[in-house]
Image (cartoon, grey):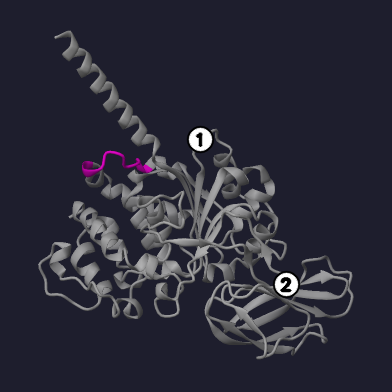
Amino acid sequence: MKRITLWYCLFILLCNTCMYAGELLKHRILISTDIGGTDPDDNQSMAHFLMYNDCFELEGLVSSPFGGSGSKEELLRMIDLYEKDYLKLKKHANGMMMPEELRALCKQGRRGGTPFKGYENSTEGSDWIVKCAKKKSDRPLWILVWGGLDDVAQALHDAPEIEKNIRVYWIGGPNKKWGVNSYTYIAESFPNLWMIENNASYRGFIGGEEVNNKLEYIEDYRSFGRGKEPNNKLNESYYECSIKGAGNLGKDFKSYYDGNIKMGDTPSLLYMMNGNPDDPEGESWGGSFEPIFESPRSIFNRNSTLKDTVAVYSVVEFHFKGPKSDKAIGTPCFTFRIDNQDWTGVYLGNGVYGIKYAPKASAVLHYKITSDIKELNGMKGAFVVSELWPGNTTKNGYKLGKNWFTDKRDVHLFEGKWQGSRTVLRWRKDVLTDWAERWNWLK
């Protein structure tokens, strides 16, 4: 009898230990998002996060909008919706955070891009990143960046010692274009940072005809539990079959892309939910990546021509000669118009004026400069953007350490022109099926 009692006690102790270990296995995460800014897909990804927050140890939600009306208030608005659905979610997942806990973790980061040097003044958001990164823990702080790297760059500038404590999963691509200055600061000053630079793989999760018409797994609506006829557009079918009528978060979801799935930032969360985050080269819902040892940079001390080719997502830097000036370094001096968008060029000192740019897709791009400085006004040029990243080694590229990873170059993993996107696309059905179960909790 004593032996049975002893074994029973050991069994209970072991169970409790396993439960405690399970809690420890939750990854520490902080999300930096440009929610409410120029692209509403962050709202979709935030809805997804809120419905899965029991899977993580959340340490912060930082609003880091490049443009638009993005702000911490938009995070709080989303949490208000979550609060209305909270009891239904909690009924199925006891680890759901209380709404007031989430609100306390919302911080305002930088509004607008950083200057040429890549950093400027600390923000509530960057200070919070530093505070979280300095916590004593045997687990790294995973920073999931859905917009620019501005607050991460500022945090590293203000407290460089946190580099060893953080791991960054960044949705780059277009965000690299918007936040090229903060990116170049990090690549040059912190090459040993643990970084996943996802410039294209994330596109495997974006819905729409460009992806879904090619999918081999087009599912009958019954796979989402609704019993309707199949449709060849998973995007449209998913809202109608899985989200419609699902609580306040479901009602709000219709406001973004008419309910069609985009969620380009969600792979950062999926990476933490499925697979081994310590192994970027392995399989996971959030993609599979390979090491990169140089981030290419092309510097032109002249106007480029169509004979010049740069790699997609690479840094393109222009230095133009003009009059020497007593203007402060970094003073805006010209407008650089390219791909129907305007960018601000600055004075670099000693009669040199400059700007950085990062193309988001393969293309032939033309630019033109307007300025009150006559030597610069009217300048124009062009260059070709190749399809493969990182492409050839460049003379002025940023040398990176062993822990920097990016999209796989295997041509079989391209979906259309998007490098590595099949490493995410192959899991899309599994992810949406799993999420459909949680949407059902709200019906």
Image quadrant containing the C terminus: bottom left
Dot 2: element: loop
Query: Which residue is denoted by mark 1 in the rendering?
Result: 138
Image quadrant containing the N terminus: top left
* Crowd tier of the residue under label 2, counting other residues whose Cα lies within 10 Å: few below 14, some 14–19, many 20 or above: few
Residue at point 66%, 53% (across, down): 190
Q: Is residue 256 left or right of residue 434?
A: right
Query: Residue 314 appears in which quarter of the rendering?
Result: bottom right
Residue at point 55%, 73% (across, down): 389
Dot 1: element: loop
Q: Is residue 272 left or right of residue 241?
A: right
Is 65 located above or below residue 108 in the figure?
below
Q: Where is residue 214 in the image (x, y as percent from the top left)?
A: 30, 79
Q: Where is residue 92 in the image (x, y as percent from the top left)?
A: 21, 44
Q: What residue type is labelled 2?
A: Lys
Q: Where is residue 380 in the image (x, y as percent from the top left)?
A: 71, 89
- Residue segment shown in magenta: 91-99
Magenta span: predominant SS is loop
Residue at point 41%, 72% (across, down): 413
Q: What residue type is labelled 1?
A: Asp
Query: Which residue is denoted by mark 2 in the rendering?
Result: 395
Q: Which of marks 1 and 2 is in front?
A: 2
> For this rendering, which residue is in front, 225 or 311?
311
Query: Residue 17 appears in which quarter of the rendering?
Result: top left
Check whether the beta carbons of the residues at disc 1 and disc 2 lie within 8 A of each other: no
> For this rendering, which residue is in front, 85 or 329?
329
